[in-house]
């Protein structure tokens, strides 16, 4: 039997299960899906998955495991495969979805999704995933924990305000709420301290954060969140990919000459990254005349304040990416050299 040219494993990752498809490219360049199976998304499932793949593939040809970046659910499997010396690639979901549109898929299921990933891997030369810095992973955990604490504290403060405006406030209830708020304040302080300690141990990271915060409106926390949520932009190859990953890309529905849907951001992306860019955009509009001029120009064009603000969010995120790639500080004349009016 002639050995195939390529062998790929397409994995559709969910919280509790892994839907897996095996594909190969034959010597005549034809491709085929030749096996499908579902496994539990845990360590035991990983072992069975690898055993099943080994049984059904040709040992003379390397096997490439490919999955989408799905929140955090794909990470345990990716680390398991990488730690066992297997070829792993993680791709952005929009890249696979764009490819899937070229296939004759009438019904989208977990199975067809895994098949599309496997076929995508056959059709493209993918970069082998390298485990990112442990610091990035820890920073993401800490910044997300801090975000949860702030959300919980805001809820408690609203409850406190409602209690205090009662005709007959319950003093014991007020005391308990204040105690919980104090606890959250202490926990936030602890997290900030852990973040600072972690960053100060990495001189290169300190310099990179300092470089990013040279952008008007972008503070240290924003820089840390962006770096953490993208793992140092490990999967990002272009500004367009980054904007899509954050869910800040604009979607517009047009049908024929009569049906035109309202343009809006997709929000199909990393909500933590998207949320992190909101306040910096507002701050940048107060501190940078060039960004403010762009905002005014966009606002005068369509009259939608939020749409113009989102454009500034996108541009700030793109600037962070550019500075990271070029390893240079913000140039105040950048906006004069690069047109961003169409953002």
Image: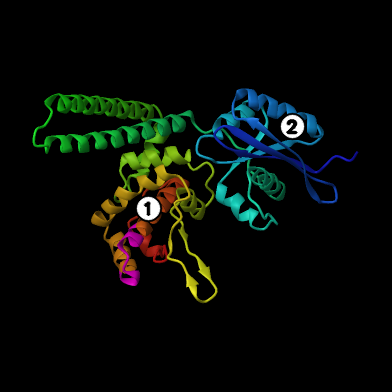
Q: Position of residue 260 (x, y in %)?
A: 47, 70
Residue 149 in the figure: left or right of residue 50: left
* Residue 117 to residue 58: above or below: below
* Residue 331 to residue 162: above or below: below
Q: Position of residue 84 (x, y in %)?
A: 66, 25
> Nearer the observer, disc 2 or disc 1?
2
The image quarter in which residue 24 lies: top right
Identified at 35% across, 29% down, the residue is 195
Q: Which residue is mark 1?
A: 316
> Considering the numbered disc 1 on the image, is that residue within a helix, a strand or a loop?
helix
The magenta segment:
300-309
Residue 41 in the figure: left or right of residue 208: right
Identified at 49% across, 48% down, the residue is 245
Quadrant of the drawing holding the N terminus: top right
The image quarter in which residue 105 lies: bottom right
Q: Which residue is mark 2?
A: 53
Identified at 64% across, 29% down, the residue is 81
Q: Residue 71 colored magenta?
A: no
In this view, the residue farthest toward the right is: 1
Is residue 311 something one can see in this rendering? Answer: yes
In this view, the residue farthest toward the bottom is: 257
Identified at 52% across, 47% down, the residue is 236
Mark 2 surroundings: few (<14), some (14-19) or many (≥20) residues within 10 A = many
* Residue 295 to residue 273: above or below: below
> Considering the numbered disc 2 on the image, is that residue within a helix, a strand or a loop?
helix
Q: Which sits in the foreground, 171 or 131?
A: 171
Q: Which callout, 2 or 1, points at the residue further toward the start of the chain?
A: 2
Q: Which sits in the foreground, 113 or 95?
A: 113
In this view, the residue farthest toward the left is: 167
Quadrant of the drawing holding the C terminus: bottom left
Mark 1 surroundings: few (<14), some (14-19) or many (≥20) residues within 10 A = many
């Amino acid at each position: 039997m002639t050995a195939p040219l390529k062998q790929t494993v397409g994995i559709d990752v969910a919280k509790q299960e892994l839907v897996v498809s095996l594909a190969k490219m034959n010597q005549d360049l034809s491709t085929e899906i030749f096996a499908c199976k579902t496994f539990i998304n845990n360590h035991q499932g990983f072992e069975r998955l690898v055993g099943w793949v080994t049984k059904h593939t040709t040992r003379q040809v390397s096997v490439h495991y490919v999955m989408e970046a799905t929140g955090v659910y794909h990470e345990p499997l990716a680390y398991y495969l990488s730690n066992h010396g297997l070829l792993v690639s993680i791709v952005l979901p929009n890249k696979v979805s764009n490819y899937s549109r070229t296939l004759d898929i009438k019904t989208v299921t977990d199975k067809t999704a895994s098949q599309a990933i496997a076929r995508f891997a056959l059709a493209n030369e993918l970069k082998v995933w390298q485990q990112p810095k442990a610091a990035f992973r820890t920073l993401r955990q800490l910044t997300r924990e801090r975000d949860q604490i702030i959300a919980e504290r805001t809820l408690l403060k609203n409850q406190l305000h409602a209690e205090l405006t009662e005709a007959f406030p319950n003093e014991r209830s007020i005391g308990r709420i204040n105690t919980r708020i104090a606890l959250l304040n202490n926990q936030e302080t602890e997290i900030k301290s852990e973040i600072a300690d972690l960053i100060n141990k990495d001189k290169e990271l300190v310099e990179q954060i300092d470089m990013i915060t040279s952008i008007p409106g972008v503070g240290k926390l924003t820089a840390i969140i962006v770096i953490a949520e993208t793992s140092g932009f490990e999967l990002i190859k272009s500004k367009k990919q980054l904007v899509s990953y954050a869910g800040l890309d604009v979607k517009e529905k047009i049908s024929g000459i009569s049906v035109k849907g309202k343009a809006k951001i997709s929000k199909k992306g990393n909500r933590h990254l998207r949320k992190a860019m909101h306040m910096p955009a507002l701050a940048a509009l107060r501190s940078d005349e060039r960004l403010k001029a762009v905002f005014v120009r966009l606002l005068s064009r369509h009259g939608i304040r939020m749409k113009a603000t989102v454009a500034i969010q996108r541009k700030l995120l793109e600037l962070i990416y550019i500075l990271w790639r070029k390893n240079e500080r913000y140039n105040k004349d950048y906006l004069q050299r690069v047109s961003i009016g169409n953002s």
